[in-house]
Every structure is written in C-alpha cells, then in structure tokens.
Image: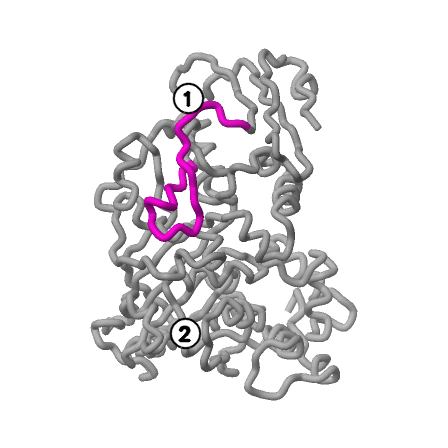
Amino acid sequence: MSVDTASISSSVPPIATTSPQVPADATEPTVVVESVSISPILPAAGAAAATPRHIRLTSHAGGFGALPIHWGAATATERGPVVGTTTKRAHRNVIGTHSGSYSVYRALAVAAGALNPQHKADLTNTSPTDVIGPYPQWSEPGRIVSLDPWGATIANVFSNELAAGYDIRPTIAITKAHVILPEVIEALQSGRLKADGKFLTPNGAAIVTKAAIEPVWYLPEVAKRFGCSEADLRRVLFEETGGMYPELVTRSDLEVFLPPIGGQTLYIFGNPADLANPEVELTARIHDECNGSDVFGSDICTCRPYLTHAIEECIMGAQRGGVGLVAYSRKEGRALGEVTKFLVYNARKRQVGGDTADQYFARTECVAGVQDMRFQELMPDVFHWLGIKKIHRLVSMSNMKFDAISGSGIEIGERVNIPDELIPADARVEMDAKMAAGYFTPGAVPDAEELKKAKGRGLTE
C-alpha cells in the first residue's frame, strides 16, 4: 500500500515525492511508504530564526556513508557502531533514536529552541569507572539481543569512526555512588548490618557501582525469543505504536531498533569483575519498577520491602567476600503502566466481597486483557553482558524470572524469599495470590479456601 499524500494536509500541499523502494528479493509482505516533502515549517516561538525548510517524510536512506552492523561479531570493529543520532541522517544505521522514551523530550527541546539539533556530545571524562568485559557471551549467537554490549566504551572502541565525523552516542554509562536508604540505616542500627567502610559506611551509605543501560534490540533474535517471525514482530510494533516507526516495515535492511521504552539500572555491591567469576558468591535480584512502593512506600504490594531486603542481602554478600547485584528495570505496573495499575487497584477494592487473593489476577486481566506484560524473555541479557554464569542466591519469588534466567544457561543456586515480617498487611492479598499461582515459597501454598481469607483494605479505610 502507499500513503495518500493529499490526505496529509489540504492546506499544506506536498511539493515532492520520490518513487518507493522495494527490495527485489523481498519474500515477506511489503508495506510501501513513499517519501514526501511538505513545506513550509517555521521555527517555534522563541527559537532562533531559521530558513523555512521542508519536512521529509521518508522511510528510505537519503545518502551514503551508513556503517554496517554485524550483530554478535567478536570485536567492536567487526560489529560496527550503533548510530541512532539525527545530526547526519545519512549515517544512521538503526530504527529509532537514543534515550528511549526520553527521545520525545529531546524533540521538545529542539522544537522549543532550547537545544541545537546539531549538538554533538562532548564525551571528555565520561568513560566508565569500571571496565565490563568483553566476555564470551557477547559474541555467542542469540545470547545478547536487547542491549549493545559495546555501548559503554564507544569513545574507545569507535574512536576512528568518531574522528571521521560519525555521531556515536553511548547506550551504557557506568559510575560510582553512595546509596542511602532508611531501611539500611535501620539494619545498621539494629545490628543486622555492620559498617566496614568498604561496602557500608558508618552513616549507612552503601558504596556501589551503578550502570544505566538503554535498550538496543536486534530484531531477528528478539523475534526468536518471542516465538514469532521477524516480519510479524515488525508489523505489530509498527501498528501498535500508531505507525511511529515506518522503517520497521519498509527497511528490512535495518535490523537494529532503539525502542522508545525505559531501560534499566544496575547496582553492584563489590567488585564488578567478580560477577563473571562463578567461584565468587553472587547475590542478585531482578526488580521491576513500582513507583508507588519503591519511592513512596505504598503498602498494597511488597515491592519496596523486597527491594530493600535484597539490598541488605547484597551488602552482606559483599562483606562475606562475594558480590551483590540489583538489576532495576523500568517496567512499571508489570509493564502495563501506572494508570492501568491504579484502575486495577480500584477494581480490586470495589468488587463484591472486597479485595481477595482468589480474584487478584482476574481483576488485572479484566482491565488490561492480560495478567502481566513484562515478558522476561529479554531480561537475562544483562546478566550475560556482565559475564555471569552462576547466581548463588537469587532474591526473588518470581517463577517467570527464574525460568528465563535458568533457561538462558545461567545456573541458579538458592532462592531467597521475603521474610514474613516485611510483608505489609494490605499486601497479603498479593503474596497469597502469587504463591497459589506458582511463585516460589518455602512454606505452604494457599489452597482455594485459604485464598478467600486474606482481604485487603477498602478504598476509604
């Protein structure tokens, strides 16, 4: 199909079109989008004066010079850089752009005249505080498909390309931090934790290495993870984002996608290099974002208590000579989003009989159409980036996370549950429902009658 250029705007007529490009050897159904130029676009109020320019609606390369990406190659030079910047569009070799969901704010800054769209990042003194890899997993077929393993070291490994004018941005940043949490201070004051000045200061600050990671998807292997064809994945991504990225269906030659979603942050307690040593005890938690609990302490779930318990376990693990890791992913409300989550809260609290464990998942499915959209298929990639082969102590009760990690070839030893005394009263509904659904518990699994006993607080209580 092709776009009806006349329907774009009757007041701003198209002034130029080019013939659509269709690969001669295309075997999948092809969606054709013509490139269109529309005029004029004037600068935003407050922005610097500029010559009116055309918008080029195109899904096709407009120049030459884009470097190839050979995903999974053994070296950075063989693999090639990920170029998702817009300063020189002929150099782009991916779909989408950097910063995930924040790319929209960058566009707003450009529209408001606050940011020069040609600005190139000065990466002086931004190099990682700790070197990660390279590890064998980086080039093992299908092992890492949702992040760029070379993303933290682009100033080093792609220095020649940067010098040649390619605007390459890091997709991973690694730094140091002190993390101060009331729960850790309380553990220190009560004697559960001991200050050592190396991993935990006398005032209760945990000393960590942290890494921020943006998503970088290699579409052919992402499709395999989800058991669908690449063509179907591209089409659905295009359609279900309202047609945000036409290149998904028109540029089969572009295999890397920078999706507009949140990334993840790693907090490492101890020496990051020890993560890759299976002889060093590793305590780890994979935590999916829950703003209400993690930040504001909402007691309807166990997210913050489980997170702070994991941090305490990681500190103790590091002090025993091991290393700790918390991988924090931006998947708010089981990746359903906070609006959907709050709607579910209301539905749970207002249903006949009140908020009970036997209806916990049903209420989510009624509102969202699915119980959980986190789909942990991509989650283990970050462990392989870190070179991890064994997790000795996994602080998680999630069967989905356990299955995804062990299914990716990483050995898991002990599973650490949340102590009962850390479970808020209103979160008992969640815990009973999860245990009955197959989540890990060292104790008894609630039966059908037991699930009806725990009842959450009402909305007005």
Q: Secondary structure at mark 2?
A: strand
Q: Which residue is mark 2?
A: 390
Nearer the camera: disc 1 or disc 2: 2
State whether residue 438 is above or below residue 123.
below
- Residue at the image point whose x is 59% and y is 60% from the top: 375
- Image location (x, y in percent) of residue 349: 69, 66
Q: Which secondary structure is most common in the magenta stretch?
A: loop
- Sequence order check, earlier mark of 1 and 2: 1
Under mark 2, the amino acid is Lys
State whether residue 16 is above or below residue 222.
above
Q: Residue furthest right?
A: 352
Q: Which residue is mark 1?
A: 46
**Residue closer to the observer: 73 or 382:** 73
Q: Name the colour scheme.
A: one colour
Q: Residue furthest bottom?
A: 444
Q: Quadrant of residue 354?
A: bottom right
Magenta segment boundaries in residue numbering: 60-84
Q: Secondary structure at mark 1?
A: loop
- Residue at the image point whose x is 71% and y is 61% from the top: 365
State whether residue 205 is above or below residue 224.
below
Does residue 237 appear to the left or right of 312 in the view shown?
right
Distance in Å between CA atoms under marks 1 and 2:
55 Å
Q: Is residue 82 magenta?
A: yes
Q: Is residue 20 magenta?
A: no
- Image location (x, y in percent) of residue 14: 61, 14
Give the position of the N terminus as an image quadrant.
top right
State whether residue 428 is above or below residue 91.
below
**Residue closer to the observer: 144 or 271:** 144
Give the crowd class for mark 2: few <14, some 14-19, many >=20 residues within 10 Å: many
**Dots 1 and 2: beta carbons under 8 Å?**
no
- Residue at the image point whose x is 63% and y is 44% from the top: 231
